[in-house]
C-alpha cells in the first residue's frame, strides 16, 4: 500500500540520494567526518588522505589528524573505503557536504577560525563564534553550521541512549540539541542566499553529472529527511521495548510543526515492519494449507511472532491509521485462515474456539471482526449441541453429522478478461445421531418406494385416468412408509433451521461451495 503524500513541495521534486543518506548514523557515516577532510577537499587530497589512513591503520597508529568532531573509535578500513567511494560520486558527495561544516567564506576551509576551534574539540568556542555571526554571516553559513552541529551532537547522544538509559541531565541536553537543530533547519528553508550558495558550490565542482536542480531537490526533501531520522530512531526504541524513548522521539518530531509530514515519515519507517508481518502471514497460511492437522500450532505461531511487530506499529502510529489497521486485520485474518484449516480437518471445536478468541482482539476493522465473530458462533454452536439436532435426544456422532457447505459475500468485479468472482465459504457441521441418519436413509428409500407404488396405483385405478392413478398410488405408498421413521425425528431438511445455518441464510448466504461461474 502506498502512503505517499499527494502534496508536492513548493521547492520541486524529491531527492532519492538524500533519503538514502538520512538515518540515525547520517553523521557517523558522513564521508568528510570519517576522512577528516573539509568540504572543499580536492580529489588529490582525498586520495592522499585515504593512503595515509591505510598506512596508519597498518601500523596501528593514529589514523587521522585532529578534525571537527572526530569519531571515537576511529573508522575502520571498510568505513574508509566506503567514504572514498561516496566522495567520488558527485551527488552523494554533495549530500554529505550538506550535512558537514562549511567555511565562513568559500575557499577558506584551512583558515576558518571556527572550524579550527572545532578541530581542537572546542565545541562551545566554535558554537559561540557561529552564534555571533548567525544573523550576519554570508549566505547563513553560520546558521547551517549550528544546525549541523546540534543535529550531530543530538544523534551522538541518541547512540548512547540506544545502549543505556540517559540521565535526566543528558535528556535535557539532548532535548535542547534537537530544538536548536530543528529551528535552524526550518529557518534555512526560507533563506534564499543559503540555497544560492549551495547552487554556486554545485557549479564550482564542474562535474557534468551534477545539475543545479540538485539544490532544489535537497531543499524539497530536507523536511521529510530530517523527520525520517527521528522516525527510524523511534522504530529502534520500539523494537527494544523502550516506549519512553519512543514517546520522546514523537515529541521531538512535533517540533517541526507539520503533523502530516511526521505521519508520512513514521509510515515510511514502519514499512519494513509491515512487510515482515505480511511475509509471516503469507508463509503461515501456506503452511496451514499443507499441514491442516498442525494448523493449530501454526495459528499460535502467527499470533506470537507478529505480536511484537504490531506493538511497534501501535506505539508509532495513531489509532485509525490505515497502515496500522491493515496490519492488524491481515494478522487476524491469517490466524482465522489457519484456524479454519485446522477446524475442518480436526473438528476439535474447543481448541478452535480458543484460537478464535486469541485472534478476535487483534482485528480492528469491522469486516475482519465480523468474520471472526461469525466463525466463533459456528464453533460455539458445534460445542453447544452435543446431542442430535434432529431428535434432540441421542448423542451426536461425528460419522453421522451432516456437513452443510455454504458460500456468501459474493463480489463480481469487471475486468478486461471478463468478470472476476470472489466469495467466502465455510462448512457447518449439523450434529446427528446414527439412528436419525438411518431414519433419513429410510425416508429416502420410502419416497422411492412410493413412486413405484404410484405406478402400481395407475394399474389399479385405470378408470380414473393415468395421472390421477399415479397421484393416488403415491399418497398410499407414502402413508404406508411413514411408520418406518421414528416419531419425533425432524426431516433432513431441518438442517436449514440449525442456528449457524439459519443465521448465514439470513445474511444472504446460500448452500454450496460457491456460485456458478
Image (tube, rainbow, N blue to C red):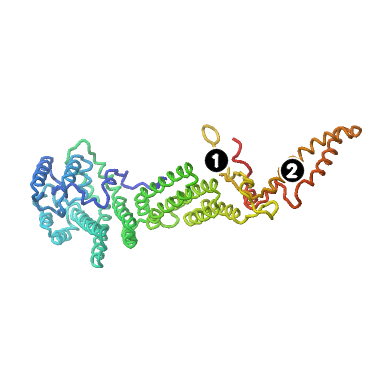
Q: Nearer the viewer, mark 1 or mark 2?
A: 2
Residue 25 in picture, x, y percent from top left: 24, 51
Q: Nearer the viewer, residue 365 or 359?
A: 359
Residue 321 in picture, x, y percent from top left: 43, 54
Q: Helix, strand or loop at disc 1?
A: strand
Q: Which residue is mark 1?
A: 422
Q: Is residue 225 visible?
A: yes
Residue 486 in picture, x, y percent from top left: 75, 50
Give the quadrant of residue 94: top left
Q: Nearer the viewer, residue 12 or 384?
A: 384
Q: Residue at x 70, y 53 (%)?
A: 391
Q: Which of the image's four quarters has the N terminus?
A: top left
Query: Sequence-wise, which precedes: disc 1 or disc 2?
Result: 1
Q: Helix, strand or loop at disc 2?
A: helix
10 Å neighbourhood of mark 1: few (<14), some, or many (≥20)?
few
Q: Is 377 on the left-hand or right-hand side of 63?
A: right
Q: Nearer the viewer, residue 48 or 98?
A: 48
Q: Nearer the viewer, residue 73 or 466?
A: 466
Q: Residue at x 54, y 37 (%)?
A: 420
Residue that protrudes farthest toward the right in the picture: 463
Residue 502 in picture, x, y percent from top left: 65, 50
Q: Is 256 on the left-hand or right-hand side of 78?
A: right
Q: Is residue 201 above or below residue 499?
A: above
- Please say if the residues under marks 1 and 2 sit with CB atoms less than 8 Å apart: no
Residue 443 is marked as 2
Label 1, label 2: how many angstroms apart (C-alpha)?
37 Å
10 Å neighbourhood of mark 2: few (<14), some, or many (≥20)?
some
Residue that protrudes farthest toward the bottom in the picture: 168
Q: Residue at x 14, y 54 (%)?
A: 68
Q: Is residue 506 visible?
A: no
Q: Which of the image's four quarters has the C terminus?
A: top right
Q: Is 249 on the left-hand or right-hand side of 401?
A: left
Amino acid at each position: 500500500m502506498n502512503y505517499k503524500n499527494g502534496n508536492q513541495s513548493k521547492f520541486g521534486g524529491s531527492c532519492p540520494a538524500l533519503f538514502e543518506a538520512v538515518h540515525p548514523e547520517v553523521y557517523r557515516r558522513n564521508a568528510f567526518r570519517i576522512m577528516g577532510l573539509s568540504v572543499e577537499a580536492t580529489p588529490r587530497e582525498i586520495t592522499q588522505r585515504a593512503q595515509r589512513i591505510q598506512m596508519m591503520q597498518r601500523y596501528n597508529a593514529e589514523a587521522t589528524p585532529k578534525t571537527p568532531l572526530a569519531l571515537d573509535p576511529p573508522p575502520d578500513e571498510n568505513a574508509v573505503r566506503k567514504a572514498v567511494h561516496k566522495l567520488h560520486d558527485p551527488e552523494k558527495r554533495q549530500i554529505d557536504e550538506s550535512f558537514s561544516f562549511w567555511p565562513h567564506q568559500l575557499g577558506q576551509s584551512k583558515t576558518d577560525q571556527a572550524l579550527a576551534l572545532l578541530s581542537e574539540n572546542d565545541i562551545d568556542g566554535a558554537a559561540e563564534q557561529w552564534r555571533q555571526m548567525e544573523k550576519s554571516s554570508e549566505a547563513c553559513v553560520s546558521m547551517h553550521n549550528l544546525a549541523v552541529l546540534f543535529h550531530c551532537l543530538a544523534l551522538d547522544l541518541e547512540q548512547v541512549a540506544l545502549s543505556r538509559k540517559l540521565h535526566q541531565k543528558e535528556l535535557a541536553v539532548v532535548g535542547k540539541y534537537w530544538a536548536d537543530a530543528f529551528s535552524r533547519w526550518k529557518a534555512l528553508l526560507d533563506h534564499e542566499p543559503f540555497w544560492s550558495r549551495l547552487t554556486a558550490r554545485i557549479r564550482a565542482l564542474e562535474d557534468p553529472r551534477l545539475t543545479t536542480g540538485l539544490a532544489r531537490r535537497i531543499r524539497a526533501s530536507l523536511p521529510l529527511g530530517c523527520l525520517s531520522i527521528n522516525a527510524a530512531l523511534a522504530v529502534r526504541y520500539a523494537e527494544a521495548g523502550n516506549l519512553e524513548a519512543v514517546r520522546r522521539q514523537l515529541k521531538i518530531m512535533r517540533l517541526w510543526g507539520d503533523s502530516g509530514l511526521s505521519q508520512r515519515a513514521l509510515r515510511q519507517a514502519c514499512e519494513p515492519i509491515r512487510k515482515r508481518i505480511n511475509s509471516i502471514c503469507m508463509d503461515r497460511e501456506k503452511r496451514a494449507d499443507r499441514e491442516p492437522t498442525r494448523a493449530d500450532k501454526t495459528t499460535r505461531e502467527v499470533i506470537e511472532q507478529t505480536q511484537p511487530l504490531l506493538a511497534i506499529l501501535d506505539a508509532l502510529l495513531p489509532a485509525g491509521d490505515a497502515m496500522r489497521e491493515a496490519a492488524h486485520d491481515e494478522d487476524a485474518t491469517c490466524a482465522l485462515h489457519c484456524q479454519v484449516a485446522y477446524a475442518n480437518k480436526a473438528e476439535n471445536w474447543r481448541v478452535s474456539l480458543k484460537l478464535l478468541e486469541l485472534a478476535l482482539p487483534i482485528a480492528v476493522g469491522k469486516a475482519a471482526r465480523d468474520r471472526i465473530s461469525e466463525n466463533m458462533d459456528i464453533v460455539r454452536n458445534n460445542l453447544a449441541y452435543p446431542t442430535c439436532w434432529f431428535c434432540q435426544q441421542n448423542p451426536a456422532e461425528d460419522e453421522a453429522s451432516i456437513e452443510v457447505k455454504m458460500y456468501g459475500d459474493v463480489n463480481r468485479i469487471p475486468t478486461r478478461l471478463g468478470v472476476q468472482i470472489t466469495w467466502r465459504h465455510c462448512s457447518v457441521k449439523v450434529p446427528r445421531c446414527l439412528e436419525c441418519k438411518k431414519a433419513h436413509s429410510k425416508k429416502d428409500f420410502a419416497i422411492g418406494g412410493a413412486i413405484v407404488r404410484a405406478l402400481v396405483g395407475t394399474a389399479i385405478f385405470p378408470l380414473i385416468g393415468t395421472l390421477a392413478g399415479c397421484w393416488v398410488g403415491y399418497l398410499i405408498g407414502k402413508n404406508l412408509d411413514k411408520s418406518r421413521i421414528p416419531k419425533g425425528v425432524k426431516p433432513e431438511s431441518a438442517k436449514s433451521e440449525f442456528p449457524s445455518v439459519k443465521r448465514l441464510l439470513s445474511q444472504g448466504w446460500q448452500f454450496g461451495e460457491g456460485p456458478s461461474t
